[in-house]
Image (tube, rainbow, N blue to C red):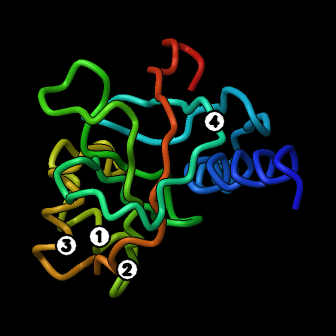
Amino acid sequence: MSHKLTRRTIRSLCVAAVALPALAAGTSAQAGGVSGPAFYVDHELYRTVATPTDLSGTGAPAQSWDTIYSFGAVQRSVATAAPGDPGYNGGRWQVHAVSLTSTYAAVLAAGDRDGNGVLDAADEVQAAIGAGALVDGGVVKYFVCTVNPVPHGRA
């Protein structure tokens, strides 16, 4: 496979890993560039900037990654950190697939601490996991994508 084709494939995977939940939620993303609203961090929407980097199989220690909880088509993903947060790892992500054990209403009852109708912070996801409403299926992908807050009014 050519280097150019490999870079294009990895870039597409990066966008897909984070932006597909956004697409399923009815937003848009540009392949290989800035996506639309893709995931939440601490109750704020963020978008990604795709890079052609795949860090799978590097053997990097666990503390070198931040986590993105991917809900698939259920809702937008939720990340544990963003630029400016203490310990933010510069956009190095491990994606954890989460699945519902019952209904989305049960997930919200277990984790939606601010009552806004969506899990939009890591502590809310972790509360739903702790209550047994969500199951963390473990890491499904390691990659690099930078993130930026979605400008207000563009959600």
In this rendering, is residue 13 above or below 40? Answer: below
Report, in whole angstroms, how far the alpha carbon at label 2 lies from the one at label 1: 7 Å
**Helix, strand or loop under label 1:** helix
**Helix, strand or loop under label 4:** strand
Q: Nearer the viewer, mark 1 or mark 4?
A: 4
Q: Position of residue 75 (x, y in %)?
A: 49, 57
Neighbour class for label 3 at 10 Å: few (<14), some, many (≥20)?
many
Q: Position of residue 69 (x, y in %)?
A: 37, 59
Please identify the quadrant where the C terminus is shown.
top right
- Marks 4,2: beta carbons within 8 A: no
Report, in whole angstroms, how far the alpha carbon at label 4 lies from the one at label 2: 28 Å
Quarter of the image holding residue 111?
bottom left
Q: Which residue is mark 2?
A: 100
Neighbour class for label 4 at 10 Å: few (<14), some, many (≥20)?
many
Q: Which residue is mark 3?
A: 129
Q: Which residue is mark 4?
A: 50
Quarter of the image holding residue 31?
top right
Which comes before the other along the chain, label 1 or label 4?
4
Instruction: Identify which residue, 138 or 59, lies in the foreground.
Output: 59
Q: Which residue is mark 1?
A: 107
Give the residue type that dot 2 points to: Leu
**Helix, strand or loop under label 2:** strand
Report, in whole angstroms, how far the alpha carbon at label 3 lies from the one at label 2: 9 Å
Give the residue type that dot 1 points to: Val
Report, in whole angstroms, how far the alpha carbon at label 1 lies from the one at label 4: 30 Å
Report, in whole angstroms, how far the alpha carbon at label 3 lies from the one at label 1: 9 Å
- Marks 2,1: beta carbons within 8 A: yes
Q: Residue furthest front?
A: 2
Which comes before the other along the chain, label 2 or label 1?
2
